[in-house]
Amino acid sequence: MLKITIHPSATELRLRLEGRLAGPWVGELRQCWQAAGATAARRAVVLDLREVDFVDPDGQALLADMHRWGVLLEASCPLIQHLVEEIAAASECARVEETSPGRPDAFVSPHPPRRHPRSL
């Protein structure tokens, strides 16, 4: 089971996940991301993974795709933090910040060096 909550603001579009990113929920997240991205305009897109406790291989592939498209990944549990670090390293980003300003409980992936022109 996965709960996806979308929190739009003037500066960012935040997708907050709770539960397990696995099975059919991977496709559901992809659809939500694509639909929400159509309204994101020039805002940053943040994927809040602080309440996610499991990600299957298809979910990992989706997170990597999202990161390559410029989505910022936030995580707090060690397992998901490690996954975010691997994704950031695989996309040749220099480092993963240990904490986010204003969010000391979360690891945050850096944005890729440049965003894709059709980035959501």
Image (cartoon, rainbow, N blue to C red):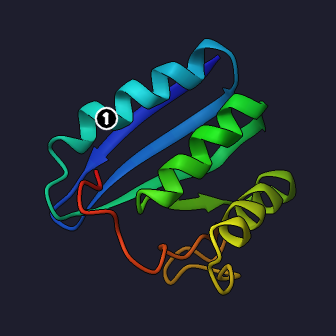
Residue 9 vertical placement versus 27 (above, below):
below
Q: Is residue 57 left or right of residue 29?
A: right
Residue at point 19%, 51% (across, down): 40
Point out the image quarter for the N terminus.
top right
Give how far across and how far down residue 106 sits, in percent.
65, 68
Residue at point 49%, 49% (across, down): 66
**Is any part of residue 106 visible from this angle?**
no
Give how far across and how far down residue 113 sits, in percent.
46, 80
Q: Nearer the viewer, residue 46 or 89?
A: 89
Give how far across and how far down residue 30 sits, in percent.
45, 30
Q: Nearer the viewer, residue 72 or 60?
A: 60
Q: Is residue 85 left or right of residue 34?
A: right
Q: How many marks?
A: 1
Q: Nearer the viewer, residue 58 or 6?
A: 58
**Residue designated by label 1:** 34
Q: Is residue 65 left or right of residue 40?
A: right
Q: Quadrant of residue 12?
A: bottom left
Residue 53 vertical placement versus 80 (above, below):
above
Secondary element at tag 1: helix
Residue situated furthest top in the rendering: 24
Q: Quadrant of residue 61?
A: top right
